Image (spheres, coloured by chain):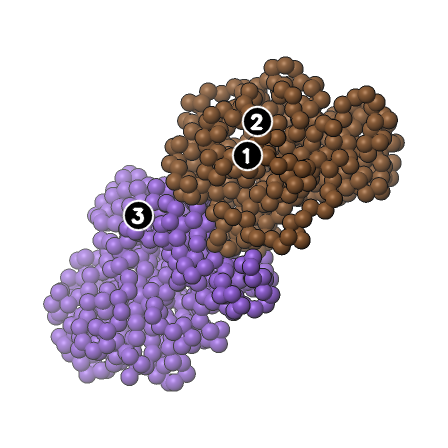
Amino acid sequence: MELVPDSKEAMKVAEGIKDKVVILGMGCTRFGERWDAAPEDLAIEAFTECLEDARIEKKDIEAAWLGSHIDEINIGKGGNFLGLTLKLPLIPITRAENFCASGTESFRGACYAVASGAYDIVLAFGIEKLKDTGYGGLPDLPAFGQMQATIGPNASAPGMFAQLATAYSARYGIPMDKLKEAMTHISWKSHQNGSMNPRAHLRKAVPKEQIMGAPMIAYPLGLFDCCGVSDGAACAIVTTPQIAKKLKPNEDLVKVKALQISVSSGEEAFYTKWDGAGMLTTRRAAQKAFEEAGIKNPREEISMMEVHDCFSITELATMEDLQISEPGKAPDDVLSGFFDLDGKIPCQPDGGLKCFGHPIGASGLRMLFEMYNQLLGRWPEERAVKNPKFGLTHNLGGVPNQNVCSVAIVGLD
Amino acid sequence: MVGIRSYGGYVPRYRLNRMAIFAQMGWLNPANLMNAQGEKAVANFDEDSVTMAVAAARDCVRGFDRGEIDGVSFASTTAPFKERLCANIVSGALATDENVRTADFGGGLKAGTTALLAAIDAVSSGSSRNVVVAAADSRLGKMGSPQELMFGDGAASLLVGSEDVIAEFKGSYSTGLDFVDHIRGANSVFDREWEERWIRDVGFEQFIPEAIDGLCKKCGVEIGEFNRIVYPCYFGGARKKINKKLGVNPEVVTDNLQATVGDTGAAHPLSMFVKALEDANPGDKILLVSYGSGCDALYFEATENIKKLPARAGVSGSLARRAELDNYSKYLVWRRMVPVEMGLRAEEQKWIRWSLVWRAHRTMLGMWGSRCKACGTQQFPPQRVCVNPECGAIDKSEPVVLSDNGGDIFSFTADMLAASINPPAIYGAVNINGGGRFVFDFTDCTTEQLAVGKPVEFSFRVKQYDAEKDITNYFWKAVPVPGENVE
C-alpha cells in the first residue's frame, strides 16, 4: 500500500511544534462505569489533580480547550460545561470535537495557543460520560451526517472495525485463525497491563483461551477484542519552556515533540485503491509526526506507545501504519512479545483503551497522561517502562474508511 | 400488435415448510393438517410488496432500454402505504425516465390482471409505448389460521408494448362482484375469510368458469383451443371440478404453485402466467384468469419472438434460489406479528428525512452513481468532487445507473451489536464493478457464505422501518451470488 503522492510543498512540515510547549501538569480520573459520578464530578476529579501537579492556581489559566465527542448524552455542546463546572472566570473555552481524537485535539489547540504566544498557561481538557445510555457499546447515533445515516449500513463500531480483519487477512494471505491468535495476544497483553493499574476500568488478567473463546460481537471480533466503554476525564496544563523552568526548576520536563492530525479524503470510502488493511490517515499522520519530531527510525527511537486499540485488530494494523512493523508482519511482532511491557516497544503500558477504558473525549489526554508519568518515572517498578525517551500517542476516530487520526509525540528534553 | 414483450418473476429466497407451522400451531386448529403440505415462500425481513415487485420488474426489463419505459404500474393488496405511490418507487428503482405514467392498483386480488388490462389499453390507444406491470403480495393470516398456511409471498412482472411482442393480446372479459370471501378493513393487518366451502363452491367453481365462458363467447374461441390455461385456486378438489366443468385436459392447466410458493394474492395469476410463458411455444393460445372481487379473463397467443427472449430468472429461476427458513418464530418476527425485544439500542430515534430523501432520490431508489468525465472514475454515491486523488475534478461527472453492475466483496462482518430484527447485521464494503466502493448491508445470506472477493449483486430492499410512525424506506443491499465462489 503506497500513500498517494502528495506535492512536496504539502508534505513539508513547517517549523512545527517541537520543543515549544511543556506539559506542566496532568490529571486523570479512574476510568470505568462510574454510575455514581456526574460529568461534573469527573471533571473536578481530574482538574484537582492536574492543578496540584502543575503547582499553579486556577486564576493562572488564561484559556481552555475542551474535548468531548457525543452531545446527546454526556455534557452537551459548547465550552460552557467546563466554565460552569470549574467556575473558570470568563476565560475563552473552545470545545473541540473530532471523534476519538477530540482529547488530542483539545491538547493540540492548547499547545498551539501557547506556541503562538497568545497565552502562557492553557488548560486542555477531555471528558466523556458514556454510561448513561442504558445499553452496552457506544450510543447508536448518526455520526456521519443524515445521508450516511439513511443509506449507510446498519452498523456498529465493532462491525466497521471488524472489516479491517477480513480485509487484512485477504490482503496478506494470513489465515483468520493466525490473525486471531495475534489479536488475542494484543488483548491478553492489555489485560496484563491493566491489571496492575489502579485507575483502569478493567483490572483483571484474562487467559488467552477465554479471550479466544469469547462470544462473537462482530465477526471476527469477540468480546475481548473490543475495548471498554467508560466514563472518565483527563486534562493537561501546558505552558512555555521558559515558564516551566521557572515554575519547576531542576525538574525533568516533558516537552511536546510532534502533534499531527490526518483526516480521510474519501479515498478510503469511495475509491477502490485503498487496501482496507490499515489506515491511510495514520500512515500520513505518523509520517508527518516523525518528521516534526526529527525521528528517523521509529522502530528504534520510540520508547513506548499508547495507541487507539478500540479493537484488537486496530492496534495490530496501527503497528504497521506507524511504521513500527513491516507491512504484513505485525502479527509476528505481536506474537514475539515486541509490544509487551517487557518488550522492545511497550504498547499500552496502562492497559490501553481495552482495559484502561475509552471515555472518548478523554482518551487522547489519558494516553498523554500515561506517557507523561512514564517519562517522569512516577509509576511503580512493576509497570514502569525502562528509560523512556519518546512516547507516542495515537487516536483513531470514526471508522477505518472515514476517520480522524491524531499522532502526538512527547519526550524529555 | 399489442401484447407482452417480456416477463419477470420473483419468489423470495426463504421457504417455510408448512409442517413447521403446523407443528407449532396445530394444537389450536388440528383440521389445518390438511393444509399443512409443501412449503410457502416467505419474504425476508427486509422485503415487502414493493421490493418484491421491484425484483420481478428488474427481471422483466433486463436487456431492455429503461429509457423506453413510459408507464409503470404496481398492483397489490398489501401496499405498505395508503398515501405514497408505490409505482413511483418501482419506477425509481428501475431508473426509468421521470416522464412516466405511474399508477397503483389494489383493493381486490384481481388487481394484477386489471393493471395488465390497463397497460394493454394504454398501449392500444397509443397513450403509452411500454408499460411495466409489477404485482406483488405478502398477505398475513393470523397464527393458526388456514390463511397462514395457504398464503405465500411473491411477485411477477410483465412488460406490455407493441414491438417484438412475445404473446399477442387477443381479447378479454371481466366481471366485478362484491363477493366478500376474504376481507381486510382499512386498518386490518390480518385476512378474514368466510366459510371455505362457500368460497370454493360459489367463488372459484362458479365465477371462474363463468368468466372463461364469457371470454370464449366474446372472442369466438373454444376452450379446447387453449394450450395453456392459468387460473388461481388453492383448493385441489375445486381445481378438478373446474377443469371438468370446462372440459379441459388438466395437463394444459398451469400448476398453481401451491406446493412451492403459496397463494401470492394479486400477483398469483401473473406468477402462474409467467410460468406458462416460460414454457410456451410459438402459436400457443394462453388463457389467463384472475380471481378475487370478480374475475378478469385474458386471451393471448404466443408469437415466434417467445423463443428469442433472452433467458431471465422468471418464476422457475427464483424458485430455484431457495433457502430453508427453519424457524416459525423467525417468520412471526420478520412479519412483525409478535413483539420482540431488540434492546434499547433499537429505540434510538432515527428519522426518515423526506427532504433529504427527495434530494437523493436517484441515489437511493435507482442506485445512480457518477462517472467522472475527466478521468473516467466511476463512484458511488455520486460525488461532485472526483474521488480519484490524482483527478479531483469538480462538477465534471455524469450520472450512471449502477444497480445492475454487481460487484465483489472487499471486506465484511457479521455484527451482533447493531440493532437488527434479523441478527447478526451482515454488511461490508463492496467494490462495484466498473468502479466505486460503498459499505452495503448484505442480505439473503449467512456469514458462512461470505468471503473477500466473492461476487455480489444488488437487491432493492427495505432499508428502514419506523414502527412508531409506520414508515418504510428503501435502499439497495448486496446479495452474494449463489453458487459462485472465490478461487
Q: Which amino acid does label 1 sit on?
A: Ile
Q: Is residue B243 above or below residue A25?
A: below
The answer to which of A152 and B349 lies nearer the viewer is A152
Q: What element carries label 3?
A: loop
Q: Are marks 2 and 3 on the same chain?
A: no
| Picture quadrant of residue B180 | bottom left
Residue A56 position, x and y percent, is 85, 26
Chain B color in figure: purple
Note whether B46 is above or below A390 in the view shown.
Answer: below
Which residue is label 2 attached to?
A345
Colour brown belongs to chain: A
Side of B368 relative to A369 (left or right): left
Residue placed furthest toward the front: A296
> Given the image, on which type of amino acid does mark 2 rest?
Ile
Tag on residue A324? 1
Total marks shown come to 3
Q: Residue shown at 67%/53% (left/top)? A: A9
- Local SS, label 1: loop
Q: Which of marks 2 and 3 is in front?
A: 2
Q: Are marks 1 and 3 on the same chain?
A: no
The location of residue A4, given as percent across then percent down, is 55, 52
Question: Which image quadrant for residue B155?
Answer: bottom left
Please state which of residues B282 and A290 is positioned toward the viewer in this rendering.
A290
The residue at the point 51 percent across, 55 percent down is A270
Residue type at mark 3: give it: Glu
| Residue designated by label 3 | B487
Chain where mark 2 sits: A
Circles 2, 1 touching at the beta carbon (< 8 Å): yes
